[in-house]
Amino acid sequence: MVVRINGKPYDAPEGVSTVEELTVLMKLKPQNTLLKLNHQHLPWDQWPLTPVAADDLIEILVFVSGG
């Protein structure tokens, strides 16, 4: 299944069915990640409940600390 992440095609492995599974695969931490699915902000507590489908548009912003 191909989705678009930050404007680029991403071939999600077979078996990935939720936003949470996708973010775990990408090694993202919900505490410092902002995610939009199809132009709508998706709170991290909704990630396990939200399915991912082919051609979904996903925007990911990861916050890092530093000086």
Image (spheres, rainbow, N blue to C red):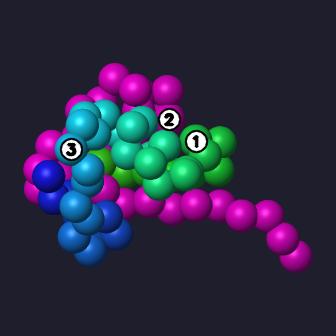
Viewer-side residue, 4 vs 15? 15
Q: Which residue is drawn at 51% across and 62% down?
A: 61
Residue neighbourhood size for the residue with mark 2, other residues' Cα within 10 Å, grouped as few (<14), some (14–19), many (≥20)? some
Residue 15: image quadrant is top left
Which portion, as a residue range, is magenta?
39-67
**What SS does tag 1 mark?**
helix
Location of residue 64 in the rendering, given as x and y in whole percent from the top left corner: 71, 64
Location of residue 18 in the rendering, given as x and y in whole percent from the top left corner: 31, 34
Residue 7: numbered disc = none
Location of residue 8 in the rendering, given as x and y in whole percent from the top left corner: 26, 74
In front: label 1 or label 3: 3
Q: What residue type is labelled 2?
A: Trp
For label 2, the residue is 44
Viewer-side residue, 17 vs 64? 17
For label 1, the residue is 30
Viewer-side residue, 26 vs 49? 26
- Position of residue 59 in the picture relative to residue 3 (left or right): right
Residue neighbourhood size for the residue with mark 3, other residues' Cα within 10 Å, grouped as few (<14), some (14–19), many (≥20)? few
For label 3, the residue is 14
